[in-house]
């Protein structure tokens, strides 16, 4: 599980000794004195004290306090929280009212995985120093993760009042206000933060991300541009500006935003490709010039050529991407990544025989990845024994035992459940496979075949056996949402997200479930926009955001996103189902029928197949 708060890079010290400690620590390369619990790999000094305790001076800090504090800070800075805790606790005994020590000790407990102690230190620190900026910053982040946004707002407001942590507090403060529907307040705080912060530490980027997460795209664009003014080469600011402009349908402006990067990165192929993609979406004629420039710059370099092909495929230009891959493979027949990528492109285009021919060429090496793709082709062609042969060869050549699940998933939709189960059993004969992996592969096949009750019972048993397995938890929630208790699924996913609020899989799972069920579209939008901000090229994330837009009645925006998702993850039945529904809402009947037919041909699960058939026949499942 993830820590319940991010660390602050700027701290507040309420005592003179802590100011001195910070000054000594920076750039000093301190080691630590020998003590119990020194972690492996930390050099133990030969002297009794590396930091010699000065003579007692009534006007200065206590020398023993300073010694323990510096040792604790050293261990914490080196990532050895367990070694830092004893020293910080001793320092706390000498100065029990120091908010700075409480803050660092709470951080150390959290980093060691002991959240109970971390919270206890934080609570006691706030009791002693309720206005301490650093402690309030930590508390604000904790309350925000718990989705207690009124409390988070109060803590962030106290932290925001101090210049020392203003830049760290401002994004959280803006986010809490937006959750509370206090948009004018959020805009006012953001403007004030820019006025008060220095040019080198302005919080514009974090505030832009908060506005983007809440769908405030105009404000997000403004603050991404502020961030670029502060740091022109900041890749996150550039990517944010381009991403928001694209979401707004202003791809031409997004291309213009990339222009300054050519001065800094004149030979970077990816900049040319991004420019080409944006201009292509804007239907600008010069798009191909940038692609041609990328091809010229990547000449002779197969790795760079892969980027060109990937850009074509991501935009749905399959023929162009495949052509680049074939040309590259002719020039570099030994380049395995090109061969694998071309095989994947052929498989995604349903040219399974072509994929097999490519992977059977004399120059194709006998490695796990090659056998893995050959197995997928044979499964798609319905050749069960050949699938087993290649899948076992893949595992014997180095594919880990945890590949049983994805290999099993290739069987789903291609064979009847009894046949698929038999092939799975043949696959694992004589191979050490964890019991959980084997049982989960059974649950996947049962669920895909429509035997939902058996799948739910099996995953429920697995999750009870391994309650800390996040993947099992996500699968349990998915099955519960479709075949059991929607409320229970939402509750579990909500807790998972509190534990790690920036995990893309958790954000997507909860956001999609809320959007699909219509439970809370406003909350779903925040989670899905955050997931998209963190992983804009993941097809499943783009699909979820597009589906949310459909649910909100924003059909044109939904179409752009779902077409992009379909290019990113071709032949995904659920994406095609969503895309077909959007086409239908826009009156594009022929396009909708093609999407539904393509989805049915891709081997969908029983419930998705039922929905595809219903939509294709004009009924709703």
Image (spheres, grey):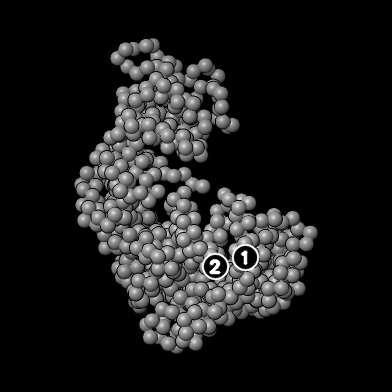
Check contact, mark 1 vs mark 2: CB within 8 A. Answer: yes
Q: Please give the name of the residue rendered at 48% of the width and 29% of the height, measured from the top-left corner.
A: 85
Q: Residue furthest right?
A: 430
| x and y, in percent, of residue 423 in the image | 73, 70
Q: Please give the name of the residue rendered at 47% of the width and 37% of the height, measured from the top-left corner.
A: 116
Compared across the picture, whether 57 is left or right of 617 comes to: left
**Residue 445 figure quarter:** bottom right
Is 618 located above or below residue 411 in the figure?
A: below
| x and y, in percent, of residue 607 in the image | 55, 75
Q: Nearer the viewer, residue 608 or 196?
A: 608
Mark 2 burial class by Cα count in 10 Å: few <14, some 14-19, many 20+: some
Is 291 located above or below residue 6 in the figure?
A: below
Secondary element type, mark 2: helix
Is 389 located above or below residue 204 in the figure?
A: below
Compared across the picture, whether 189 is left or right of 11 comes to: left
Q: Please give the name of the residue rendered at 23% of the width and 49% of the height, measured from the top-left corner.
A: 189
Q: Which residue is mark 2?
A: 483
Mark 1 burial class by Cα count in 10 Å: few <14, some 14-19, many 20+: many
Q: Please give the name of the residue rendered at 47% of the width and 44% of the height, measured from the top-left corner.
A: 3
| x and y, in percent, of residue 137 in the image | 34, 41
Q: Which residue is mark 1?
A: 455
| x and y, in percent, of residue 537 in the image | 45, 65
């Amino acid at each position: 599980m993830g820590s319940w708060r991010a660390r602050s890079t700027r701290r507040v010290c309420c005592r003179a000794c802590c100011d001195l400690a910070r000054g000594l620590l920076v750039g000093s390369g301190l080691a630590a004195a020998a003590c119990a619990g020194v972690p492996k790999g930390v050099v133990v000094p030969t002297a009794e004290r590396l930091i010699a305790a000065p003579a007692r001076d009534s006007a200065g800090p206590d020398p023993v306090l300073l010694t323990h504090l510096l040792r604790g800070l050293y261990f914490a800075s080196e990532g050895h929280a367990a070694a830092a805790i004893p020293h910080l606790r001793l320092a706390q005994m000498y100065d029990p009212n120091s908010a700075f020590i409480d803050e660092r000790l709470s951080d150390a407990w959290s980093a060691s995985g002991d959240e109970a102690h971390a919270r206890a230190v934080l609570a006691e620190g706030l009791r002693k120093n309720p206005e301490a900026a650093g402690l309030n910053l930590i508390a604000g982040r904790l309350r925000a993760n718990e989705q207690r946004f009124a409390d988070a707002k109060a803590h962030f407001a106290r932290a925001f009042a101090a210049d020392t942590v203003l830049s760290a507090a401002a994004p959280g403060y803006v986010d809490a206000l937006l959750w509370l529907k206090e948009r004018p307040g959020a805009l006012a705080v953001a403007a004030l933060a820019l006025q008060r912060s220095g040019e080198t530490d302005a919080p514009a980027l974090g505030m832009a991300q908060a506005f983007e997460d809440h769908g405030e795209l105009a404000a997000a664009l403004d603050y991404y541009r502020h961030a670029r003014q502060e740091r022109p080469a900041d890749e996150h600011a550039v990517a944010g500006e381009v991403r928001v402009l694209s979401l707004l349908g202003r791809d031409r402006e997004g291309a213009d935003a990339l222009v300054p990067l050519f001065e800094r990165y004149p030979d970077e192929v990816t900049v040319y490709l991004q420019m080409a993609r944006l201009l292509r979406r804007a239907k600008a004629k010069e798009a191909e010039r940038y692609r041609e420039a990328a091809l010229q710059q990547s000449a002779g370099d197969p790795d760079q050529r892969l980027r060109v092909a990937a850009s074509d495929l991501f935009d749905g230009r399959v023929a162009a991407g495949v052509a680049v891959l074939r040309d590259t493979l002719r020039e570099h027949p030994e380049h395995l990544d090109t061969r694998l990528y071309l095989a994947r492109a052929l498989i995604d285009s349903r040219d399974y025989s072509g994929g097999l021919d490519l992977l059977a060429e004399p120059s194709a090496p006998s490695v796990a990845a090659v056998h893995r793709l050959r197995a997928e082709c044979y499964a798609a062609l319905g050749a069960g024994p050949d699938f087993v042969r290649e899948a076992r060869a893949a595992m014997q050549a180095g594919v880990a035992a945890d590949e049983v699940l994805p290999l099993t998933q290739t069987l789903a939709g291609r064979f009847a459940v009894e046949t698929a189960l038999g092939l799975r059993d043949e696959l694992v004969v004589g191979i050490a496979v964890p019991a959980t992996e084997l049982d989960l592969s059974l649950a996947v096949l049962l669920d895909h075949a429509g035997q939902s009750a058996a799948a739910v019972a099996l995953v429920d048993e697995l999750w009870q056996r391994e309650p800390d397995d996040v993947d099992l938890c996500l699968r349990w929630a998915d099955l519960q949402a479709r075949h059991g208790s929607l409320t229970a699924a939402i509750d579990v996913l909500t807790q998972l997200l509190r534990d790690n609020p920036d995990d893309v899989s958790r954000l997507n799972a909860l956001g999609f479930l809320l959007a699909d069920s219509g439970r809370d579209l406003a909350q779903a939008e925040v989670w899905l926009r955050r997931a998209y901000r963190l992983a804009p090229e993941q097809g499943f994330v783009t699909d979820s955001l597009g589906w949310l837009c459909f649910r909100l009645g924003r059909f044109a925006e939904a179409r752009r996103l779902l077409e992009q998702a379909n290019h990113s993850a071709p032949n995904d039945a659920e994406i095609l189902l969503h895309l077909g529904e959007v086409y239908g809402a826009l009156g594009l009947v022929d396009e909708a029928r093609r999407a539904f037919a393509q989805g049915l041909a891709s081997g969908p699960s029983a419930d998705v197949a039922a929905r595809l058939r219903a939509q294709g026949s004009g009924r709703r499942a």
